[in-house]
Amino acid sequence: MPRRRTIAPILGTLSLALGIAVVSAQEQGGEQPAKPAPRWPDGRISFTGTPTEVGNWEGPANGTLFFNIDSKTGKRVTPPSSLASNLTVDQVPFQPGVRETYMKRESQADDPHTRCKPSGGARRWHTPYGIEIVDLPETHEVLVLSVGSPHSWQQIHTDRTEHPKDLQPSWYGDAIGRWEGDTLVVDTVGFNERFWLTREGVPHTSKLHLTERLSRPSFNQLRYEATVDDPGAYTKTWSGGWNLRWSAGNEPFDYLCQENNRDPQRMVGH
């Protein structure tokens, strides 16, 4: 568990390089350009709010890593939050029997998240009530805090390039982060098999090597893309993702999953 730290001094120095246009949209004859993402004093992109514009990221419940096919119409089911480049379920390189495991989870009756278990991998980016991304360069880490579920967090190390040997499998694995321009690339291994990779039940094994890419094209948009490398569940690597929206004014609150479980209908018989 990471020690407690005060982040207020960091937020207090946050630079607001917003570049707001001085000419109105009407004078331009077009739409108002998207509000640019804020940056830190050193020029790095910021995934947080600003001292005067608090908020966090709302994980879309319907975001998917790949598109399902409607059994009645034969058409792709394309939630608007999902990336247009996502594969369809027929294109996902499942190992034999793994797609059947995925289909059995369609009712979501056994979703570990509804039982207050941590949500690793892409499942974390569905978390309701907001997701905080706290950049702590002075301690060489980025923390991803989930407001919903069990109020858990992932620690991303930015001061090393190799994973420890003989990792004990865990919910969030061992994560290493690096910057590629304005994109934070997170390389994670060492997962356990006790969570679903996404909300709709995408399977994985302990062999999962997950590469996640986080970018902020504008103030109100966070782009999440994951590359799945798991020879235990898939015959080759594949990628998918979705967009998260900025939820202005949303901040962490006293949420305890065990006392606030709002999904009892999916726990029948358990």
Image: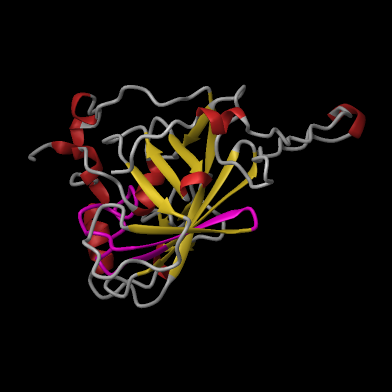
Residue that extends furthest to the front in the rendered view of this protein:
138
Q: Position of residue 194 (x, y in %)?
A: 20, 54
* Above/below status of 177 relative to 165: above
* Above/below status of 240 relative to 152: below
Q: Position of residue 34 (x, y in %)?
A: 72, 37
Front position in the image: 25 or 181: 181
Residue under the image location 33 percent in, 47 percent down: 199
* Above/below status of 138 relative to 53: below
Q: Position of residue 195 (x, y in %)?
A: 24, 52
What predominant SS class does the magenta segment belong to? loop
Q: Total marks drawn?
A: 0
Front position in the image: 245 or 26: 245
User: Residue 112 lies in what quarter of the image?
Assistant: top left
Quadrant in the picture for the C terminus: top left
Asked whether 192 falls inside the magenta stretch, the response is yes
Residue that extends furthest to the left in the rendered view of this protein:
269
Residue under the image location 78 percent in, 36 percent down: 19
Q: Position of residue 220 (x, y in %)?
A: 61, 36
Image: magenta residue range: 181-210
Q: Is residue 41 left or right of residue 109?
A: right
Residue under the image location 28 percent in, 70 percent down: 165
Q: Is residue 167 left or right of residue 5?
A: left
Q: Is residue 177 left or right of residue 232?
A: right
Residue that extends furthest to the right in the rendered view of this protein:
27
Asked whether 36 falls inside the magenta stretch, the response is no
Front position in the image: 16 or 67: 16
Front position in the image: 136 or 145: 136
Quadrant in the picture for the N terminus: top left
* Above/below status of 164 relative to 104: below
User: Residue 11 lies in what quarter of the image?
Assistant: top right
Q: Is residue 159 left or right of residue 146?
A: right
